[in-house]
C-alpha cells in the first residue's frame, strides 16, 4: 500500500513515515537527564489500545504514552487515538490523509506530527529527542515513556517464547510504538504495541539494548514528552 510520502508498506498497520526536522537537534533530552547512572524502571500502562487494521500507529503510540505514568490522562480510547492520528495527518508536511473528507486519501504520518498533535491538546509543554542509545535509556529510566519511530522487520511480528523481538528479516514498513521500561541488568527495554493484548506478552515485547540501538541508528527516532499534564 502506498503511503502519503510515496513509500510503500506491506502491512497497513505499519505507516510511520520517516521525517526529520533539523530544528529538533536544538531540543535534546540530554539537557534534562544529564550524566546519571542508568536505572531500571517500568512506567505503568493500564489502558491498552488496539488499532486493528487501521494504519494509525502514530496516533495509537502517542495515546499509549498519554495513558501511561508519570501522568495518566483519563478517557484515552481507540476512538481518541484515531483522532490524534487524523490531527497529526493534518499537521504533517504531506497532502491528504485518512480522516473524513481528506483529499487525496492516504495513510501514514510522522512521529513529529504526532508530537505536534499532542502538544496542541495541552497535555505536554514540549517534546525532546534522544540522539544516542544512552540518552534514550536515561530518558526511559528517569523522564518517562517515549515514542520509538522505527522500521519494522518481518521477524518482529512474532515475539519469541520470552517475548523478545529481533530486527531481522525484511523491512516491511515503518512503525511507531511506545517504549516504557528498561531493565539494566538484563540489558533490554520494554515496548507496548497497539495490536491488542493477545499479541506478545499481554501486548508487550522486549528488545535488547543492542537491537534498540540498531533500530535507532537505521532512520529511527525517539521522542520524549516533557512537562506532561492531564
Image (tube, rainbow, N blue to C red):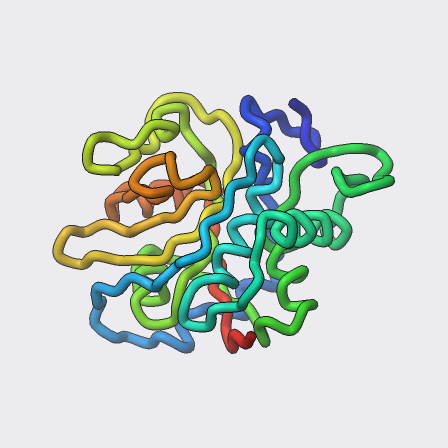
Q: At which x and y percent is residue 16?
A: 57, 40
Nearer to us in this view, 39 or 68: 68
Query: Would you say 155 lies left or right of 51 here?
Result: left
What's the residue at 53%, 64% (across, down)? 25
Residue at the front extreme? 75
What's the residue at 32%, 36% (across, down)? 200
Nearer to us in this view, 214 or 87: 87
Query: Would you say 34 lies left or right of 131 here?
Result: left
User: Residue 166 is drawn in which quadrant?
Assistant: top left
Q: At which x and y percent is residue 213?
A: 32, 47
Up the image or down, 213 lies above or below 128; here it is above
Quadrant containing the C terminus in the rendered view = bottom right
User: Residue 181 is drawn in which quadrant?
Assistant: bottom left
What's the residue at 43%, 43% (across, down)? 193
What's the residue at 65%, 47% (across, down)? 82
Up the image or down, 187 lies above or below 11; here it is below
Quadrant containing the N terminus in the rendered view = top right
Q: At which x and y percent is residue 116?
A: 66, 62
Up the image or down, 106 lies above or below 228; here it is above
Amino acid at each position: 500500500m502506498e503511503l502519503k510520502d510515496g513509500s510503500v508498506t506491506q502491512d497497513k498497520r505499519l505507516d510511520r513515515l520517516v521525517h526529520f526536522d533539523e530544528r529538533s537537534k536544538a531540543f535534546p533530552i540530554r539537557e534534562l537527564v544529564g550524566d546519571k547512572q542508568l536505572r531500571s524502571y517500568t512506567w505503568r500502562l493500564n489502558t491498552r489500545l488496539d488499532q486493528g487494521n487501521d494504519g494509525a500507529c502514530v496516533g495509537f503510540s502517542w495515546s499509549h504514552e498519554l495513558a501511561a505514568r508519570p501522568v495518566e490522562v483519563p478517557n484515552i480510547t481507540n476512538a481518541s487515538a484515531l483522532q490524534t492520528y487524523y490531527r497529526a495527518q493534518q499537521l504533517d508536511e504531506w497532502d491528504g490523509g485518512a480522516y473524513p473528507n481528506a483529499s487525496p486519501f492516504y495513510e501514514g504520518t510522522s512521529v513529529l506530527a504526532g508530537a505536534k498533535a499532542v502538544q496542541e491538546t495541552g497535555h505536554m509543554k514540549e517534546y525532546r529527542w534522544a540522539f544516542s542509545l544512552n540518552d534514550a535509556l536515561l530518558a526511559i529510566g528517569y523522564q518517562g515513556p517515549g515514542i520509538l519511530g522505527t522500521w519494522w522487520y518481518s521477524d518482529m511480528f512474532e515475539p519469541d517464547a520470552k517475548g523478545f523481538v529481533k530486527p531481522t528479516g525484511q523491512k516491511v514498513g515503518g512503525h511507531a510504538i511506545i517504549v516504557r521500561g528498561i531493565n539494566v541488568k538484563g540489558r533490554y527495554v520494554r515496548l507496548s504495541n497497539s495490536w491488542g493484548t493477545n499479541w506478545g506478552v499481554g501486548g508487550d515485547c522486549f528488545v535488547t539494548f543492542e537491537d534498540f540501538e540498531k533500530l535507532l541508528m537505521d532512520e529511527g527516532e525517539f521522542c520524549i514528552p516533557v512537562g506532561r499534564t492531564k
